[in-house]
Image (spheres, helix red, strand yellow):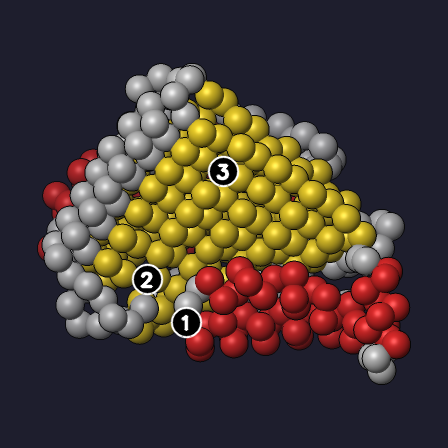
Amino acid sequence: MGLEISILEKISKNLNEPVWLFEKRKQAFNEFENLLFPQKYGINISLSQDFPILTEQDLLEEQQLPGIIAEKNVNILPFSEALQTNELLIKENLFITLRDEKDKLCVFNCAFFNSGMLIQIPKGTILTSPIIINLDQKTKARVEHFLIIADENSKATIIENSSSKKSALRSQIVEIIAKESANISYISIQNFDKATNNYSIKKTKVSNNANVYWFDCCLGSKFTKSTITSFLEGEGASTKNRGIFLGDTKQVFDLNIKTIHSAPNTTCDMLTKGVLQGNAKTIYRGLIKILPEAHSSKGFQKADAILLNENAEIDPIPILEIHNDNVKCSHAAAVSHVNEDQIFYMMSRGLNELDAKKEIVQGFFEHLIKEINNKVLENLLRGFISKQLVMM
């Protein structure tokens, strides 16, 4: 791919980084060189072929900062500035959720990220309005790393709204450190151009009685590989995952949701719903892993999908890995074609077939959309879905 260690030096210099961060980049680069692309199961996807050929110019091109709307009592800085004022905080927390990650796409981001941002919600801060991140990608390659630190007893909602130009690459890592009794919601809507390859890794470390809520909406891109992992490390920690995907033509989505319970009385609730048409394909993998010390924990996961024609395909793979008998866990998956009786009924009431399908799809997603509990965002998401359905 033409990726050389000299590019790291130039990126690091452009961002005015300290030596320790450059050393972490070099370590990630060495791992990237030696690792293979992830294996695929079910749907046949070759990441080694789909991963774009990047040049030095692509990675060194100046990155537009995302548009951010936020209250004043929160600390939001690009890494180039945050390293001047919060270097110790970043050094202590950057990459902490990645652990001993041995994934080629993950270490690629750690080595080559050319855009970074720190979001810190101070102790006891309750944000009444969401932090909004608007990103309209105009460069060929954006490799971004967000570090979000929610201090004790803080509460915030973060909304990420992303789009792109044609034939782009977006590689993203979002790390959330949720300290004791913090409550963080991270809502992301990607509506990339259908020539864009999107690789997104989101991870959180959740402490005692803290909660992290994920809502991931996948509408655009040619190919998306999205992984969301929650480490429930404190007693009483919890996470809720909600996902929506809507694909047509030849779009491919590789969706992975994982929750690792390593403390007692932890809870996870994972629900993903999607609709596919044309030759669109999705593989969904969900994992709930309960370690021996995580007694009295609860886990639930479900994946539901509707296929609007015979060529669309989804492979749901829900997994439970339980190492403690004193827990409650369940999983389910349901795949169906659009209900012909519903179509007939709605057409008998005056709708044409396309409008009848649109109503069924919108109704299928509606209770998840309402769960966001933000009227502006709910209407925005309904608008995106409606526009996508018109194009189907």
For marks 3 and 1, the one nearer the N-term is 3
- Cβ atoms at labels 2 and 1 below 8 Å apart: yes
Q: Amino acid at mark 3?
A: Phe
Residue 204 or 84: which is nearer the viewer? 204
Q: Which residue is mark 3?
A: 300
* Left-right relation of 277 to 376: right
Q: Which residue is mark 1?
A: 374
Q: CA distance from mark 3 to mark 1?
A: 25 Å
Q: Amino acid at mark 2?
A: Thr
Q: Is residue 391 visible?
A: no
* Structural crowding at the residue carrying mark 1, measured as other residues with C-alpha within 10 Å and reported as few (<14), some (14–19) or many (≥20): few
Quadrant location of the C terminus? bottom right
* Structural crowding at the residue carrying mark 2, measured as other residues with C-alpha within 10 Å and reported as few (<14), some (14–19) or many (≥20): some
For marks 2 and 3, the one nearer the N-term is 2
Residue 214 position within the rendered picture, expressed as x and y whole percent measured from the top left: 42, 52
Q: Which residue is mark 2?
A: 157
Q: Given this view, does label 2 or label 1 mark the residue nearer the observer?
A: 1
Position above or below: 233 against 337: above
Q: Secondary structure at mark 1?
A: loop
